[in-house]
Amino acid sequence: MKNKIIEMKKILKNFLMVLLPAVIMASCTKNKELLYNEADMVYVESIPDSTDYTFAASPASLLSDSIMVNFRIIGKASDKDRTINFVPTATSTGKAGYHYKVGNAVIKANTFSARIPIYVYRRAGLKDSTLTVNLMVTENSDFKPGYPSRLRYKFTLTDILTKPSNWESTWAAYFGTYSEVKFRFLIAVTGKTNWNSGPLPQDSRFLSQKARNALLEYNQQNGALIDEFGQQVFFP
């Protein structure tokens, strides 16, 4: 009896050794088929997925500009160009075609990503208002929406001088507490207009030193520069 049990165990072991690889191969084949049959998807790759844009930091001659948004696909590259459906939601207060326009939203043939411009326009009404535009990836014949948390891009648009969205994370270390007077001074002495993008470390140090020198010169010629809160402007 004992020998029969041992023999049965050997037979079962041999059977499993033959069956298991076949099951694994069948499972892998099925997973591959599911993967390759899955429709290609696209998502917003830009991080952060929002920005605050103001024309107030630019010369009056600048009537339009662009915000660049990065996209990436999930799936295979194609031998033809494919379009991304990137449309405003009902919560947007900016008017497409008047305040802004989404550029040619195309993933080029044999590529996996694209950098798409959103053109923004300087309109008179922006002098006393701030508009919001919420854009979202939706399905079309080329792509399905990708990661649910990476389908939107939001931007605000105004011609009012506003605090850069990345002041605390990027600029505070170089220029300290934000004030409008300080910010206007920085724009004037550095010539920099786009403060919402992250600079290279060497650029930040250059801007910081330039601002320090300019403030020292200003204070020597005019007395201390005072901000709208009654505080003397200084850089740490």
Image (spheres, rainbow, N blue to C red):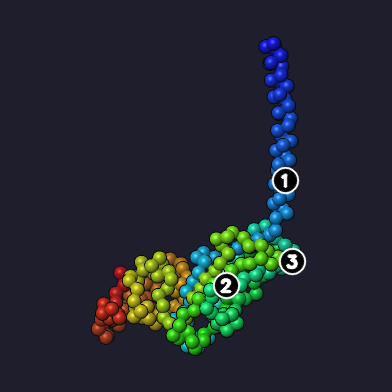
> Residue 21: in sight, yes or no?
yes
How far is mark 2 from mark 3, CA to CA? 28 Å
Q: Which residue is mark 3?
A: 80
| Helix, strand or loop at mark 1 | helix
Question: For the point 54% across and 65% down, which residue is it?
Answer: 46
Quarter of the figure with residue 127: bottom left
Q: Position of residue 20 (x, y in %)?
A: 70, 33
Question: For the point 52% across and 71% down, which residue is it?
Answer: 154
Tell me which amino acid carries mark 3.
Answer: Lys
In depth, the one of 150 and 56 nearer the eye is 150
Question: For the point 51% across and 86% down, which residue is it?
Answer: 123
Tell me the number on the disc at residue 30: 1
Give the label, 1 or 2, closer to the camera: 2
Instruction: Estimate how packed mark 3 is, as few (under 14), some (14 to 19) or many (20 or more) residues with alpha carbons within 10 Å.
Output: few
How far is mark 3 from mark 1, CA to CA? 28 Å
- Quadrant, the N terminus: top right
Tell me the number on the disc at residue 76: none
Q: Position of residue 228 (x, y in %)?
A: 30, 81
Q: Which residue is mark 2?
A: 89
Tell me which amino acid carries mark 1.
Answer: Lys
Tell me which amino acid carries mark 2.
Answer: Thr
Q: Position of residue 224 (x, y in %)?
A: 25, 81
Q: Earlier in the sequence, mark 1 or mark 2?
A: 1
Q: Earlier in the sequence, mark 3 or mark 1?
A: 1
- Are the residues flagged by discs 2 and 3 in contact, CB closer than 8 Å? no
- Quadrant, the C terminus: bottom left
